[in-house]
Amino acid sequence: MHSTDRPRIDRRDIDKAAEDLKNWGKWGEDDQLGTLNYTSAEDIIRAATLVRQGKVISLGLNFDNNGPQAGRSKFPPVGRFNPIHTMLRTGTDAYSGVLDKRGMRSADDIVIIPSQCATHWDGLAHIFFDNHMWNGYDCREVSSFGAARNGIEQTKEKFVGRGVLLDLPRYLGLDWLPEGFAITTELLDSCCEAQGVKVGTGDFLLIRTGQMEEKFAAGSWDGYNGGDAPGMAFETLYWLQDKQVAAVAMDTWGCEVRPNESVEGISQPWHWICIPIMGLTMGEIFKLDVLGEECAKTGAYDFLFVAPALPVTGAVGSPINPLAIL
Amino acid sequence: MHSTDRPRIDRRDIDKAAEDLKNWGKWGEDDQLGTLNYTSAEDIIRAATLVRQGKVISLGLNFDNNGPQAGRSKFPPVGRFNPIHTMLRTGTDAYSGVLDKRGMRSADDIVIIPSQCATHWDGLAHIFFDNHMWNGYDCREVSSFGAARNGIEQTKEKFVGRGVLLDLPRYLGLDWLPEGFAITTELLDSCCEAQGVKVGTGDFLLIRTGQMEEKFAAGSWDGYNGGDAPGMAFETLYWLQDKQVAAVAMDTWGCEVRPNESVEGISQPWHWICIPIMGLTMGEIFKLDVLGEECAKTGAYDFLFVAPALPVTGAVGSPINPLAIL
Amino acid sequence: MHSTDRPRIDRRDIDKAAEDLKNWGKWGEDDQLGTLNYTSAEDIIRAATLVRQGKVISLGLNFDNNGPQAGRSKFPPVGRFNPIHTMLRTGTDAYSGVLDKRGMRSADDIVIIPSQCATHWDGLAHIFFDNHMWNGYDCREVSSFGAARNGIEQTKEKFVGRGVLLDLPRYLGLDWLPEGFAITTELLDSCCEAQGVKVGTGDFLLIRTGQMEEKFAAGSWDGYNGGDAPGMAFETLYWLQDKQVAAVAMDTWGCEVRPNESVEGISQPWHWICIPIMGLTMGEIFKLDVLGEECAKTGAYDFLFVAPALPVTGAVGSPINPLAIL
Amino acid sequence: MHSTDRPRIDRRDIDKAAEDLKNWGKWGEDDQLGTLNYTSAEDIIRAATLVRQGKVISLGLNFDNNGPQAGRSKFPPVGRFNPIHTMLRTGTDAYSGVLDKRGMRSADDIVIIPSQCATHWDGLAHIFFDNHMWNGYDCREVSSFGAARNGIEQTKEKFVGRGVLLDLPRYLGLDWLPEGFAITTELLDSCCEAQGVKVGTGDFLLIRTGQMEEKFAAGSWDGYNGGDAPGMAFETLYWLQDKQVAAVAMDTWGCEVRPNESVEGISQPWHWICIPIMGLTMGEIFKLDVLGEECAKTGAYDFLFVAPALPVTGAVGSPINPLAIL
């Protein structure tokens, strides 16, 4: 169903969901990990047994000037840009002989990279609910000095566990889900059944919409960033809470359906609840095409998933190179 | 033995090693991965079976202003600096109400990060031998536009396999190896034997010197970057070639012993061979203290190792968050 | 005349111009200033007498995300981008009370700025002729470490003198010169005569084409960067040499006419000679509309011109805020 | 007198000064320029007549890795660093032939520069008084998106006028004023008299303490940034208000005397009033040694002063290359 045909989410709906789904305190007053806590040591041991082929598939885009930030969008600018890569020493310096006084010929470099420019984790300090963030911390803990609480560095030993892919367009016989397509709880359940996979506690849930392939086919990212997109309906928050997933990641800019289901004045209602209220870490702009093909081939939709964040102290997200190990 | 007591490496020694150890063409004319090719699918499957406790240990430093680049050093400057993290939107903006016109309260950020500022992989485009780099490519392929060959993005599905730790100071009964301590082939062999572990084809070899703990104890990184350090003797190149490791990583700034064993005018002779001639990827500034303790406790010095590079196109290295999964 | 109707410049023409116009050694073997040397102390004293109204007009664009680098262009990318401005402390931090432990409430910031992203000086290390730059220095003096010779910091006490504006579209009764319009020596002379102004030794010559106003009218910079443009014909190099101007600045991306007058394989032939051979500093992306109106009103086309470069050591250009003081 | 021997400034003193010296509304409700308004067209015309020698002296440091941010300091970090200059194309690229497919050999670059890392203007959005900034604007107008009010771009046609130098160490027969030396109103008056110069409405007042030369002599910036320093006593705010200067600039990190004269918990009390209450723009880290020598030689302590800010939209300060034109 198209998002604009669905009942509008208003502030009361959001407040109700916040009441229903609030996980604050569940893992202690000092917790900064949220649902990442769901993954147990046992889960990791079991996930390792899913490595059957010894095959590694990267779920990340390369970080370069062809990334999604090149797309033109009507979304109010948030200051992100494609990574800027510059050199500190080069092979041309070497060839020119200017490095020889150092006794070694080497190259070196810098990257200027917005945390959320391409494939990334949203950290738990990324979204606020009124004046609070995950676990009830005051939003002022995230100042120009960075996130004093819920910074991405807290997660540095997380993001290892069982990955499960739900390949929605393949299940529906489509190349990709259309813009505005609202992914419902019912669809998630039926896809699981069709794929023969169960989503459980501590899993890393990857959901493919195919929108990235649509943009690849178009040869342009225009409209990808903050444009219309298929994505999660508001109701799926309850499903995710019920399943106790560790994190959810998708192949779109913002996971939730766009146009949003919300009334005017409220943007990204699913985000309002997911990150600050549930403590559910979210991955965005994952590249899931190759993984989808592989899973279809083998019929196995689960695997070892390892996607460590770069532990930049106080960061509210992280560029990543997530790996599915099959 | 202290590096200054060892025979001096001169250009003829280097040329001989280059002749002895050159792997160019071994994995085809177009190869850009070098010894990372040693890790087979079987190796990955076997490595996954090493996950016995479901425990994840990060081998990376946090990326922040307390990183190693704060240290003062006499090494000629290479332009690296500690990561600079700045915010694009904050919780204080949220609290101040200035985000509400966007319909959502969120934080966002940027990091300006030299590839090699803290825990990182050196890519195969990092070091040149005369006018060539790994696999014989012309060094001019690494220009201000980045590395057209051997860029770190080539490795995006590598860095998964069996990790092996050699904890040298623990084996020798020391807190840390002293500056200038040359790690010999003989020491590597005897440590392997004492630890009851064999280093084999496709392994990721981690070698602890303890120098990072020495700097932690001193409360300052002064002298760490390009200062004197324990590290690999030149002769170990032959041992590494023989063992067919996929990569080697250490807890020092530059892996090899400093002062270097080379004659004046040649700096970092081990690097000259390791990266461009052998195609051996090198990890530096790994944090190995916790892993060392854990291995000592269990007596098992091998584990699943997953350390994906950030695939910045054309980069000659990558900041990383390497994981040991036990 | 449209640039494509003009005789094509080939390598022989360029070599001849290089021979005719080479100023290497003219100001000594160690000179790093080129034609900026033409401005004498007397010139500066006289220029100061042109301040008749006490009026200051900025000839610079603001540096922000609306700058010219937002334009899409077919020119091969050179890595420039609009300035990125990020905050280190904010008023929202202040309001939120998080700064009070410092005993003062303050804001602070950073800008990431390509030298040539908007209004700027091209320095004398910006263009090379074969393997040399201005005054015969080896081009390898400009490495990843910056320009060891001809860096923009050399000019830090220059860019003060008499400014002269030639307002070509106003003279020709046009809103702006069309794309591909080649500005000839004859046109420069006739405009001088019509405006009643002489261009002389040590002057800073500003030439308005109106292209910037065309882009303002279009509401988009598309096509401005490296697209077709009105600009200087190759022949004007001789005129500029003859006039002995200190520098020349225009309101286009690259001063010279585009499509270029050159044969395939040679880009920007005027640049080849102007900077490295003549030592003539060039200003680009100057905003000349307001100055044009003012000069038309008073009939006086000369003024005190002060446009200090930011002395970034080793930079090959500088963002600037040039001032006409009338 | 040493700052620690002076009466302590507490919050009541600050509130009284705020009441006494508040210029809010003086130049209209919408003013964003403060005391820069004092400089009239007549002042600029007269200032131009001070150009007697045609000599230009830069009052700026070069922007490079040797700048003041290299100094170690006990001041709580504010995130500033020395400018980072990186290349986008180089002469070594040219020499290596990798640019020739572009038809032109050129170099290009980027600088990453904190507004206040070296010689700079503090803008009127830099300091807040409680929840307000200059002219009574809400401090929340300065968010992560930059300064919506009082941004430095507002000043792009200012910073031209009569400059006056007070060379205090020369007047007192010292190499430099010692740390903690409080510059009093009396000293300013007596120095004016000794130098034969009057400070008047709309002037740009430059005050030399010699501390920069002390650091040059020491060969290190340690202690310069936020360390102890000679500087303005709190009482001089009244003198500056009375003189109606357009701006004041000095050769120290922060103009005012350090240790500050304030009670614990209040830092930089002079700043609290100067910028947000009086609307007085402040210049810091000016290099005044050469100008001091020149003025001493000629006996004339006034000159044309031109120091345009880089108009980075929303910036709260600007790196500059200020010029004295004599």
Image (cartoon, coloured by chain):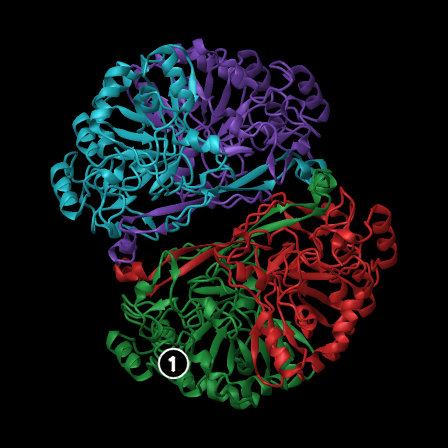
Chain colours: A cyan, B purple, C red, D green
The quarter in which the N terminus of chain A is drawn is: top left
Which of the 4 quarters of the picture holds residue B174? Answer: top left
| Left/right of residue B315 with respect to residue D103 in the rendered view | left
The quarter in which the C terminus of chain A is drawn is: top left
Which of the 4 quarters of the picture holds residue B45? Answer: top left
* For residue C147, above or below residue C48: above
| Left/right of residue B184 with respect to residue A318 in the rendered view | right
Residue placed most toward the observer, A69 or A51: A69
Residue type, numbered disc 1: Leu
Residue depicted at x 48% and y 39%: B117
Which of the 4 quarters of the picture holds residue A50? Answer: top left
Q: Residues within 10 Å of mark 1 (few under 14, many from 20)?
A: many
Rendered location of residue D103, percent (x, y): 73, 43
Residue depicted at x 37% and y 62%: C107
- Which residue is labeled 1 in the image? D237
Rendered location of residue C215, percent (x, y): 56, 59
Rendered location of residue C222, percent (x, y): 55, 52
* For residue C141, above or below residue D146: above
Secondary element at tag 1: helix
Chain that bears disc 1: D
Residue depicted at x 71% and y 69%: C205
Query: In this figure, what is the number of numbered marks?
Result: 1
| Left/right of residue A22 with respect to residue A4 in the rendered view | left
* For residue A110, above or below residue B256: below
**Observer able to see residue C175:** yes
Residue placed most toward the observer, A194 or D151: A194
| Left/right of residue B41 with respect to residue C278 in the rendered view | left
* For residue B63, above or below residue B96: above
Residue placed most toward the observer, B241 or A41: A41
Rendered location of residue A210, percent (x, y): 38, 28
**Observer able to see residue D78:** no
